[in-house]
Amino acid sequence: MSTKLNLTMDQGSEFLNNFSVANTTGAVDLSTFTAASQMRKHYSSNTAINITVTLNANGVVQMYLPSSNTAVIEPGRYEYDVEITDNTSKTYRIIEGIMTVTPGITR
């Protein structure tokens, strides 16, 4: 079962969000996993925005989009998730939620 986390992305600004994955014994070593993340206007939308995800041995997951990418995203409410896949091809959704993109004002 994934964790629910609602996030905010500022249009035209770099987006960077870190969170940690842990179990009862501490941080989960994610160095052998691969990750994927997308956001969509709604779950059945054919249009997706890929979010870059990096993982490390200390259980830290980093989501990233450069300002050049966020600048072209229409403000509004989106759905997103982050999935990780282990070396046996098992996929786990570790986080999901609403991504609110706030409009840029300064031009």
Image (cartoon, grey):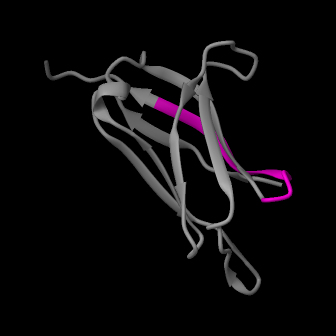
Give whichever of 66, 76 is nearer the camera: 66
Instruction: Identify the residue at image location x=65%, y=74%.
Output: 29
Q: Position of residue 94 (x, y in %)?
A: 72, 54
Q: Is residue 90 magenta?
A: yes
Q: Given the current orientation, which residue lies at the most extreme front position?
A: 87
Report x, y in % for residue 25.
Answer: 74, 87
Image height of 3 relative to 11, above or below: below
Magenta segment includes 106: no
Of residues 106 and 60, the one nearer the viewer is 60
Disc count in the image? 0
Query: Does residue 1 appear left or right of residue 17 in this picture?
Result: right
Q: What residue lies at 13% left-to-right and 18% top-to-bottom? A: 107
Front residue (pair 84, 78)? 84
Q: Which residues are magenta?
A: 87-100
Give the x, y percent position of residue 5.
Answer: 61, 49
4 left or right, relative to 71:
right
